[in-house]
Amino acid sequence: MTLYAIRTDEYVFVCANTYSFYFVRKGETRVNALEQYEFEPLEELNEQEEFLRILYHDKRGGNAIRMTMGQDPDGQPYVRHFGSVNLDKISYHSTRYNAYVTVNAFRGYRRVTSDVYCYQAIFIDLDGHNFASEEKLERACERTKERLRKAFATGEITAPTMITATGRGLGVFYVLENSIANQKGARKSIKYLSDVRKALMEKYRQILSGKGYLNVDTTTKDAARVCRMPLTYNKNAKRWCRLVFINRDEEGDVKYCHLKQLAADNHLFDSINEVKKQMISRKIVQIDAYRLPFLTIRLQKIEMLQELRNYDCSGYREYMAFIYYNAAKQVYGELDGRRLVEAFNGRFKEPLGEDEVQHLINVTDGNEAITGDYKGFYKLPDRWIIETLEVTESENEKCKFGASKREIERQNVKAEHAKARAERDQAIQAAILEHPELTYKQIGVQYGVSESTVRRIAKNAELHRYKEKEVSENNEGNIVLMETSNVQKMSESLLGVSSALLTSYRELYSETTIQRRNRQQLKGQLSFRVGPDGMIDYYMIS
C-alpha cells in the first residue's frame, strides 16, 4: 500500500489512499482527543465509521439508506439510493459523487417518511449558501464556530452529540439515547420530538441572529431528511465533509440525548409550562360550572331537530341517539350520559329497544382514535351530522348545525336587534298616522332617530303626507285653494263660504282624512281639485 505524507511544523498528514487519512503529531503514533469544543477534524482513523456508529447506535434493526448524486456518462444528473442494515455496506468514499445518509432508520429501502422505522436524532443544518464569496463563507463558519463554543461553554444551549463540517456549513446532531419506534403507541413521543426539534431550531436561530453567521435551514424537518457523510467530497464547495466534534463524558463515552432533559436544560417550553402552572393554580370549579360549550349546544340542536320532526324520526333514530350520547358523555360523564340518552330515546314516538341503545353506547365507549390521541368517544363534525341525518335547509335555519356558539350568539343578538327595530318602526308608523300635526323631525326626536329615518320608515310602509289646500276668495269672488299643512287653517279659510258648499266640503274632507289616515289610496275614491276657472271639481280616482 502506498503511503503519502505531508509534513508541517507540528503534524504529519498521512494518506493511505483517496479516503483513509489521519493526523500524527511528531513523536507520537496517534494524536489524543482534542480539547472539547475545538471544531477541527477529529483524529479518528475513520471518521465516517465513527459517525455512522454514533448516529445508528440504536437503529433497532432498521436500514440505513445512502443517497448519491452524480452524472451519467451523457452528463445527465441522477440520484441513487442504497439501503442496508449493515453499516459497512453504507460506508462510502469517493470524490466523484455527493454522498449522503438518512438521519433516521427505515423499514425497507425507500426513503419516504411513511417507511421510517425509528427516529434516531435531531438534525440541524447550518448552511452558508447566502454568502457570495468563499472568503465570506469562511469567515461566517469561523464566526459561527466561535459563537457556538461560547454558547456551549456558558450553558446557553446544550452541546450536541456531534458536529460535521459539510463544506458550506455545519451539521449539528442531537442523537437520542433511545430511538423512538415509528408505531401507533409512540405518537405522543414522535409529536414531542417534533416540538423539541422546532423549539431547538428556534433557539439556534436566536443565538445566530445577526449578520455574518451561518443560517439555520428550516427545511430539515422532514423525517426522510439526509445529511452529508464525513469523508465524502462536497463537489459544489470542492471540500471534504469532516467530523469536527464528538461530545464525550469524562470517561470518554459518547453523550447521547434525552428529549425531556434536552427541553428542560434549554428552557424550550418554559412559557408553555408557566401557562400550565397558572391554570393549575386557579380556583377549582365544579364540573357543573363548566361545560364544553360546543357539545352542550350540540345536545340542544339534536333535541330541537327531534322536536321539529315531531319525534317521529324513523330511519334516523339510531344515529340521533348515537350523536346525542357521544356529546352527553363528554360533557356530563358516562353515567349521566347514559341517563340522558335513555331519556332522549324515550321521547321518540317509537323508542329504540334497550339492546339497540346499549349497542350504540358500547360502540362509543370502545372507540379509540388511530392516532392514539383520544378514546371512549368520537369526534363528529357538523357536516357529517347534516349529511347523515339529512338535515334540510329549513331545519338547519333553526338548529344551526355548523354554527359555533359565538356565531349563534351573534345571530341571536342580531335577531333581538331586528325585533327591537321592528317594534320601533311600528311605533313611528302609528305616530305618523295618529299625529298629523307633528313633523317628521319632531317624531324623530321623540323616538331618538333622525328625520331621514322617519321618512324612510314612512316610505317603506307606503305612508305619504300631502299638503292640503287652503280655500279663499279672490277679488272676483271666486273660491281659490292655497297650500297649507294644517287642518285648522283650512277650516278658518272657509269663513264666508256658503253653508251648503262648506258642508259639502267638510264631508268630502272628512272622508279624505279617514282614507289618508288609513293610507289606503284605492281606485274609485272621491277626491277634489281646483278647476281651470278656480272652482272646486269633484272626481273619482282611477
Image: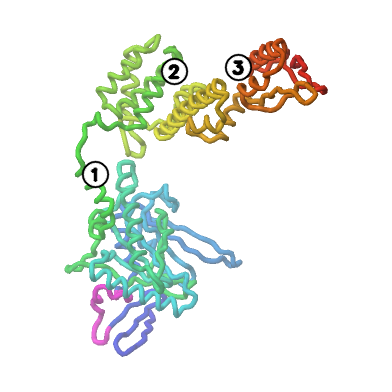
Query: In the rendered structure, which disc, 2 or 1, sits on the residue that comes first in sequence?
Result: 1
- Nearest the viewer among 541 and 485 is 485
Q: Main secondary structure of the magenta part?
A: loop
How far apart marks 3 and 1 lie (CA) works out to 65 Å
Residue at the (25%, 79%) spot, across then down: 31
Picture quadrant of residue 127: bottom left
Query: In the rendered structure, which disc, 3 or 1, sits on the residue that comes first in sequence?
Result: 1
Q: Residue 382 colored magenta?
A: no
Numbered badge on residue 518:
3
* Disc 3 residue crowd, few under 14, some 14–19, many 20+, Cα 10 Å: few
How far apart marks 2 and 3 lie (CA) works out to 52 Å
How far apart marks 2 and 1 lie (CA) works out to 41 Å
Above or below, 281 against 356 in this view is below
Residue at the (37%, 66%) spot, across then down: 171
Q: Nearer the viewer, mark 2 or mark 1?
A: 1
Q: Amino acid at mark 3?
A: Asn
Q: Which residue was labeled with disc 1?
A: 279
Q: Amino acid at mark 1?
A: Met
Q: Which residues are magenta?
A: 25-43
Residue 390 in sight: no
Picture quadrant of residue 401: top left
Residue furthest to the bottom: 9
Mark 2 element type: loop
Above or below, 246 against 349 in this view is below
Q: Amino acid at mark 2?
A: Tyr
Numbered badge on residue 316:
2
